[in-house]
Image (cartoon, grey):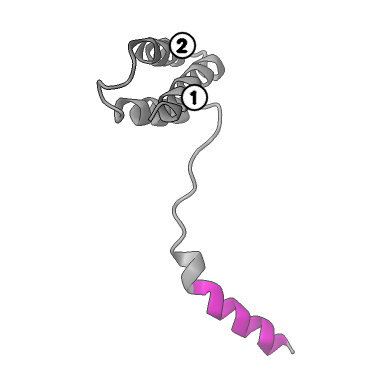
Amino acid sequence: MPWVFALLLLASWPAMAQQAAPRLISDSPEYCAELAGRFAALGPEAPAHLRLLADEGRQLCNEGQTRSGIAKLRRALKEAQRGE
């Protein structure tokens, strides 16, 4: 019976290997940078009030207030994606 488990594991290996790398979702400066980059990729067509919110988030991250900065960046991204 252990060979059945081994066979199932081998059969699922290609699917496991193709999964995308996990995204970093912690209260870290790296996550702030990731969110800022994702917002920047939206380009200048993002509404002005959302660009301002994202700028405030980046500034908070730069000042070491990562939780507040992440919250603002995530809010800006969510609203921008909702408007698409």
Up-down relation of residue 38 to residue 49 (above or below): below
> Which label lies toward us, 2 or 1?
1
As drawn, 66 above or below 37 = above
Name the residue nearer the viewer: 80 or 65: 80
Residue sitting at 54 percent across and 79 percent down?
11
Which residue shows up at 67% across the image and 89% down it? 3
Where does residue 14 sit, x and y in percent of width and height?
Answer: 47, 72
Q: Residue furthest front?
A: 83
Q: Nearer the viewer, residue 16 or 28?
A: 16
The amino acid sitting under disc 2 is Leu
Residue at horizontal 47 percent and vertical 59 percent from the top: 19
Q: Tell me if mark 2 has few (under 14), some (14-19) or many (20+) residues whose alpha carbon lies within 10 angstroms of its own.
A: many
Element type at mark 2: helix
| Quarter of the picture holding the C terminus | top left
| Rendered location of residue 55, percent (x, y) | 37, 12
Task: Specify the quadrant that holds the N terminus.
Answer: bottom right
Across and down, in percent, residue 28 comes to 51, 27
Which residue does the numbered mark 2 point to in the structure image? 60
Q: Is residue 77 magenta?
A: no
Residue 30 sits in quarter: top left
Q: Which mark is residue 15?
A: none
Which residue has dot 1 on it? 74
Q: CA distance from mark 2 to mark 1?
A: 13 Å
Dot 1: element: helix
Give the residue type at disc 1: Arg
Give the magenta part as a residue range: 2-13
Where is residue 20? Give x, y as percent.
44, 54
Residues at circles 2 and 1 in contact by the CB criterion of under 8 Å: no
